[in-house]
Amino acid sequence: MKKSLIALAVMAAAGAASAQSSVTLFGIVDTAITHGSASNGGESWTGMTSSGYNSSRLGFRGTEDLGGGMAASFWLEGQLTTDNGTAGKLDFLRRSTVSLSGGWGELRLGRDYTPSFWNLTVFDPFGTNGVGTNIMLSGSGALAAAAGVGTVVRASNQVGYFLPPNLGGFYGQVGYWFGENDPADTGDGYGLRFGYGAGPFNVALSYASTEGLADIEYKTWNLGGSWDFGMAKLMAQYQRDSFFSPLGDEDGRGWLLGALVPVGAGEIRAAYSEYRVDVDGDDPRVRKLALGYVHNLSKRTALYATIARVRNTNGFDVTLGGASAGTGNFNSTGYDIGIRHSF
């Protein structure tokens, strides 16, 4: 009888421990056949690619209940290249964070998305993936690269704070990242994002600033919003980017209008976006139209197809689907046809 009671006590303790902590393996496998072409002498390309609908990834996340409403958690997530099965060194460059959270919010340390990137992907029908990717990501990325900054999407060495989720629809985050002479990130920087989402309505404003090379500084801010009417979800964004250097300044700006339209077990996606750079005597500009359809076979498996076209003027050279750039003011067309499975 005594041994039975001891066994029951051990089993109860083990059950309590497992209830207080958990570790999850998760991922996405997304592979597509992609084609791209460009006018004015550009070369076309057709092949198999990864992440046409969602970014292919493999990750581990876990949470421990510390009691009193407190929890500790970790998140390690790496990129997969599913068309050829490679995963690099299986690093965790997509996300590598450890956190403490409670009724006061969440403190998060490590490599993560920048606050300003969230608006580019949350308020884009294509979520910045595949040939339908938001053209503002290409434009702002070009300005950031000119400034020697690599923190448009993610920043390493980041200290982040997130507001608690019980503020009546208000949400927000702030982050500060240490450059640590990291060639991928370059310099110290900070960002913030605040928004309000309730019912069908969601809107958010973000800002970020990062030091670049040779006294260059990159700044960006954007505003995004969406409204779900049931028969369609409309999205819109506006963004301004600047880099400042001893040799002169340069500014860029862009906007996007998009929609998600549910159709039975599927969804139509559409977006028009534009980005331009202000240069004396010139006006580099790129415009993009994207249309796609996603058919959900289940909650985890989907078939998708996307077609997009860009028009470059006055020096912009954006291409789609792996095509090489043409000369002058060329156009580029691309498509993705693929399968996405999450686990």
Image (cartoon, grey):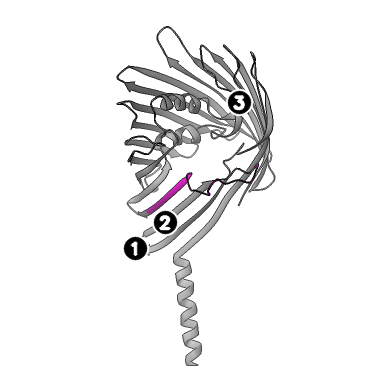
**Mark closest to the chain's N terminus, 3 or 1:** 1
Q: Which residues are magenta?
A: 83-99
Task: Give the main secondary structure, helix, strand or loop, of the magenta stretch.
Answer: loop
Mark nearer the viewer, 2 or 1? 2
**Mark closest to the chain's N terminus, 2 or 1:** 1
* Residue behind mark 3: 320
Circle 1 crowding by C-alpha within 10 Å: few under 14, some 14–19, many from 20 = few
- In terms of depth relative to the viewer, which is nearer, 15 or 177? 177
* Residue behind mark 1: 68
* Residue name at image x 45 percent, y 76 percent: 13
Quadrant for residue 195, please give it. top left
Image disc number at residue 73: 2
* Residue name at image x 69 percent, y 33 percent: 47
Circle 2 crowding by C-alpha within 10 Å: few under 14, some 14–19, many from 20 = some
The three-letter code of the residue at mark 2 reads Ser
Q: Position of residue 52 (x, y in %)?
A: 62, 36
- In terms of depth relative to the viewer, which is nearer, 132 or 228? 132
The three-letter code of the residue at mark 1 reads Gly
Magenta stretch holds residue 87: yes
CA gap, disc 2 to disc 3? Answer: 38 Å
Q: Secondary structure at mark 2?
A: strand
